[in-house]
Amino acid sequence: MTLDEINNLAGGDCPRFSVFAHDQLPMPGVKKHLNEILNREIRVVDFKIKKSKHRVGTDCMQIQFILDGEVCVSFTGSTVLMDQVQAAKMNGCMPFCGTVVKIDKYFSFS
């Protein structure tokens, strides 16, 4: 932009960063490993899925939940959990309560 264009901008012409950058902010909460919450009911309130920083070519889900009145977050590469949480959101069932269980090598909500 030229200086004239910048000077002619009205204050209301720009969207606030906080309006569109919600997904860029880290989710608040105490970090928990999935093994710490196994077989305990949690209330899932939010999630986001991004490319994994640790395993190239895979996705990683950050899940935000409430456990014993405390806001927590956990990270997982479990495609089963990702599919279940995405399905819950698509069906308008967020937030939801569930229990993370381990079946053989896989994590799942029950």
Image: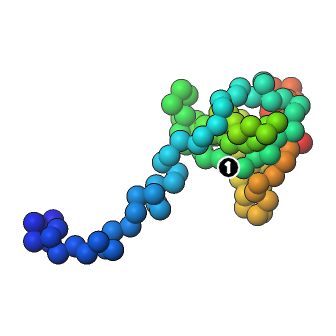
Q: Please, what secondary structure does the residue beneath circle 1 have?
A: strand
Residue at figure coordinates x 81%, y 52% from the top left: 96
Quadrant where the image shows the C terminus: top right
Q: Report the front residue among 92 and 4.
A: 4
Left or right position of 33 against 99: left
Which residue is tagged 1?
A: 46
- Residue type marked 1: Asp
Q: Residues within 10 Å of mark 1 (few under 14, many from 20)?
A: some
Left or right position of 75 against 17: right
Residue at figure coordinates x 55%, y 34% from the top left: 52
| x and y percentages locating residue 54 in the rendered image | 54, 26
* Residue 3 position (above or below residue 41): below
Task: Tell how many labels.
Answer: 1
* Residue 84 position (above or below residue 93): above
Residue at figure coordinates x 17%, y 75% from the top left: 8
| x and y percentages locating residue 24 in the rendered image | 48, 48
Residue 108 at least partly seen: no
In terms of image quadrants, where is residue 35? top right
* Residue 43 position (above or below residue 104): below
Q: Report the front residue among 58 and 17.
A: 17
| x and y percentages locating residue 80 in the rendered image | 76, 41
Residue at figure coordinates x 79%, y 39% from the top left: 69
The structure's colour scheme is rainbow
Left or right position of 103 against 11: right
Left or right position of 19 against 62: left
Residue 86 at least partly seen: yes
Quadrant where the image shows the N terminus: bottom left
Q: Report the front residue among 63 and 82.
A: 63
In terms of image quadrants, where is residue 76? top right
